[in-house]
């Protein structure tokens, strides 16, 4: 168990969606010596940037959540960039942490690393059982490489490096830009606008049969902080709820919460992405006592309430640790822009 409240902590991605909630959770835990430089201050895709970061801040604890990310459209258009940027950011940062003797490194990965046809629920032992879903494979494989780095650095150098894999995140302060958002914020915006403008029907990508698992962002932040405090093992850990939700059911829930009563039209010419996703979350509960406490219904209500209260300023935003879209996704809070649609669930 590490008393992280007494440590100097570096958070990459701290200006993103998850990152902002992670900073809030760290402060609630009593942490005060926290550094979360912006992309303008440090672009981690630049060689040498991580070294300069450590020389300046001298962090004892590192939480690496920065990612160059995007939805289905952006992953299709920028596979090389997503692979390179996510690999180089992590490799350089973890190596700098080793050279500077950081006490703990927590790396935020992705469930995009799982094989496309992994048996459900996804168990950490199945991570290497095949190739990931093709569209998001470059991103997922880049994160897999960081898991290997964490494990080999632990074996050779004794580094306390852990690897965490959250499912699809959602919640207040998410990115609601229609060009860059993920499935939950994209659908919320669509249905809120359709209700306000009396538009009918609402069109969603795919046929609604794909399934996903959704984790409320504040629960995810709690899990990461708990793991940083007390998890010390080379094995990766799923972070989720363990509840599989069909996209068709998600759409119905969001329509109900937003008060939309019109027709829903499914564009079956567009892709579903990976067919099913659901995690075995027993390791997180067993190893550091994490169990998600926010139901999907309650989380959606909170997210819709936040969006309707802030919709003028919620049109865009940086994101963290799950593919978001962008034109040039770089650095610590980097967010890639592109053409994700409401149904393009990761």
Image (cartoon, rainbow, N blue to C red):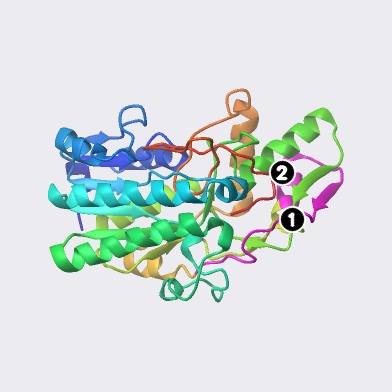
Helix, strand or loop at mark 1: loop
Residue occupying image coordinates x 82% and y 28%: 197
Q: Identify the image quadrant of the N terminus.
A: bottom left
Quick check: is 272 in the magenta stretch?
A: yes
Q: Tell me which numbered mark, 2 or 1, is placed earlier along the sequence.
A: 1
Quick check: is 289 in the magenta stretch?
A: no
What is the quadrant of residue 245 in the picture? bottom right
Residue occupying image coordinates x 64% and y 40%: 339
Residue occupying image coordinates x 36% and y 63%: 289
Q: Position of residue 199 (x, y in %)?
A: 85, 34
Q: Across the whole image, how many numbered discs are drawn on residues?
A: 2
Residue 139 appears anywhere in the view: yes
Helix, strand or loop at mark 2: helix
Residue of label 1: 206
Q: Identify the image quadrant of the C terminus.
A: bottom right
* 58 sits to left or right of 221: left
Residue 31 appears anywhere in the view: no
Mark 2 or 1: the one toward you: 1
Segment tinted magenta in the rendering: 251-279
Of residues 22 and 108, the one drawn nearer to the viewer in this rendering: 108
What is the quadrant of residue 203 in the picture? top right
Residue of label 2: 257
The label number, if any, that marks residue 214 in the structure image: none
Work out how far the residue at label 2 is from the one at label 1, CA to CA, in angstroms. Answer: 22 Å
Crowd band around label 2 with a 10 angstrom C-alpha radius: few (<14), some (14–19), many (20+): some
* 327 sits to left or right of 263: left
What is the quadrant of residue 271 in the picture? bottom right
Q: Residue furthest top?
A: 312
Residue occupying image coordinates x 58% and y 24%: 313
């Amino acid at each position: 168990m590490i008393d992280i409240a007494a440590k100097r902590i570096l958070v990459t991605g701290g200006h993103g969606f998850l990152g902002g909630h992670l900073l809030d959770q760290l402060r609630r835990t009593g942490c005060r010596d926290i550094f979360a430089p912006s992309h303008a201050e440090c672009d981690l895709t630049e060689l040498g940037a991580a070294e300069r970061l450590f020389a300046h801040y001298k962090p004892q604890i590192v939480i690496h959540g920065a990612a160059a990310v995007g939805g289905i459209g952006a992953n299709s258009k920028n596979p090389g960039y997503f692979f390179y940027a996510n690999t180089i950011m992590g490799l350089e940062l973890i190596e700098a942490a080793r050279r500077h003797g950081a006490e703990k490194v927590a790396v935020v990965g992705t469930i995009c690393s799982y094989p496309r046809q992994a048996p459900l629920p996804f168990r950490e032992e199945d991570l290497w059982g095949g190739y990931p879903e093709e569209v998001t494979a470059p991103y997922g494989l880049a994160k897999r490489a960081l898991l290997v780095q964490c494990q080999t650095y632990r074996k050779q150098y004794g580094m306390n490096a852990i690897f965490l894999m959250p499912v699809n995140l959602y919640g207040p302060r998410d990115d609601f830009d229609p060009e860059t958002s993920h499935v939950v914020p994209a659908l919320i915006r669509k249905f809120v606008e359709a209700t306000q403008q009396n538009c009918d029907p609402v069109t969603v990508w795919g046929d609604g049969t794909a399934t996903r698992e959704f984790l409320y962002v504040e629960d995810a932040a709690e899990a990461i902080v708990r793991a940083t405090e007390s998890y010390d093992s080379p094995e990766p850990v799923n972070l989720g709820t363990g509840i599989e939700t069909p996209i068709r059911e998600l759409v119905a829930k969001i329509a109900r919460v937003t008060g939309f009563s019109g027709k829903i039209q499914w564009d079956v010419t567009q892709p579903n992405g990976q067919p099913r996703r659901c995690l075995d979350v027993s390791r997180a509960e067993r190893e550091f006592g994490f169990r998600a406490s926010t139901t999907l219904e309650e989380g959606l209500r909170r997210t819709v309430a936040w969006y309707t209260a802030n919709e003028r300023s919620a049109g865009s935003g940086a994101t963290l640790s799950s593919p978001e879209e962008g034109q040039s996704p770089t650095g610590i809070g980097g967010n890639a822009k592109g053409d994700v649609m409401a149904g393009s669930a990761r």
